[in-house]
Amino acid sequence: MPSAHDSHYKLLFSHPEMVRDLLIGFVPGDWSQTAQFDSLERVNASYVSDTDRQRHEDMVWRLKVGPHWVWVYLLLEFQSQPDEWMAVRMMAYVSLLSQHLIKEGQLEQGKLPALIPIVLYNGGRSWKSPTNVADCFAPSLPGLAPFRPQLRYHLIDEARLQLSSTPGVRNVASALFQLERSNTPTDIAHLAAAVGEALQAPEHQPLRRTVNLWLRRLIRRKMPDIAAAELDQIDDLLKGPTMLEETLERLYTEAIEKGLAKGQSIGMSQGLSQGLSQGLSQGLSQGASQLLSRLLEQRFGPLPEWASQRLQSASSPQLEHWADQLFTASTLETLLATQDSAG
């Protein structure tokens, strides 16, 4: 079942403004220079079965490029690791869409229209799976290479994008990717305010409401122990940075203090059973390890066994170092590979 974060992310890309900015900012080619982005329209996924509709719904768009229609197949992936067979899955989805276009007569001079298959991935691990279905097949036997299927999709690996650091927001999709990476209340508040400036027009109000919902989920995911009820008192998180920044700074500080107190409490109870001096030191480390483990699961998903073992064996300075790097590291592997200079 999709998580609330997944659902809100999908809702973001049910808005044509978000799809437009994604195409303009992250899909290469001169085709976009003649694209009529005001013609973007979502296509009903009635051509798939009920069991597949959750996967396809709201992810197929079309727009005019000059006199021609171009179809965009946007697939959102939220899993923690890449899908080795994504190219095969995309081939199946494109085939279903193509059959639908043939059945409905949506053709260009008797041929299928142009199609852009896109995978937007926001998992922690770097995507190394094939982007061409041909690479999913073993080397061909002599003379059989021409029969190898060919289909390439365009990968947008969100965590590894080169995003602009210039102030202001010209591309809302890019700004939301930056918010995903932001790790301080100040960064979040100022980026949110910049997005609010970009979405002031009346026609952007539906997207603005969706961004507000998504941003609340993002803040709670990044700061899982904050007082959510107090954050909910801010009606519009995009209105301006001052109130949001002050609230987040205070809630963030309170969450850290509560977390430290909880870690110390857990550590004390475990430590006393093992001896006063040694147990106190070990107990504090275990409490910090358990707290950091919870935060890592919120950020990267369920922890693999190797990560849990590394947390359990880490020193207090190392745990503190990892906590400092928690929201700046793009992947779990990158974070736990860093070493504390003092340790």
Image (cartoon, grey):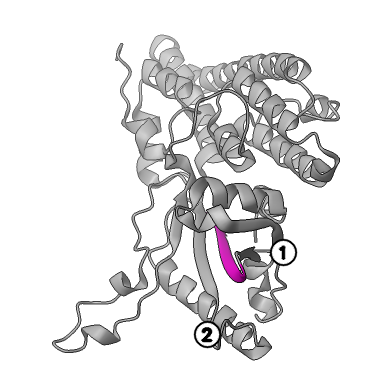
Q: Nearer the viewer, residue 84 or 261?
A: 84
From the image, tell me which residue sits under label 1: 41
Q: Nearer the viewer, residue 107 or 12?
A: 107
| Element type at mark 2 | loop
- Determine which quarter of the picture holds residue 338: top left
| Magenta part of the chain | 67-79
The local crowd at label 1, few if under 14, some if 14 to 19, many if 20 or more residues have their Cα within 10 Å, is: some
User: Where residue 308 sits in the image (x, y, percent)?
Assistant: 41, 39
Position above or below: 94 against 74: below
Q: Is residue 71 magenta?
A: yes
User: Where residue 256 sits in the image (x, y, percent)?
Assistant: 61, 18
Position above or below: 198 against 205: above
- Determine which quarter of the picture holds residue 145: bottom left
From the image, tell me which residue sits under label 2: 111
Position above or below: 157 against 72: above
Q: What's under tag 1, amino acid-wise? A: Glu
User: Where residue 43 sits in the image (x, y, percent)?
Assistant: 70, 70
The local crowd at label 2, few if under 14, some if 14 to 19, many if 20 or more residues have their Cα within 10 Å, is: few
Q: What's under tag 2, amino acid-wise? A: Lys
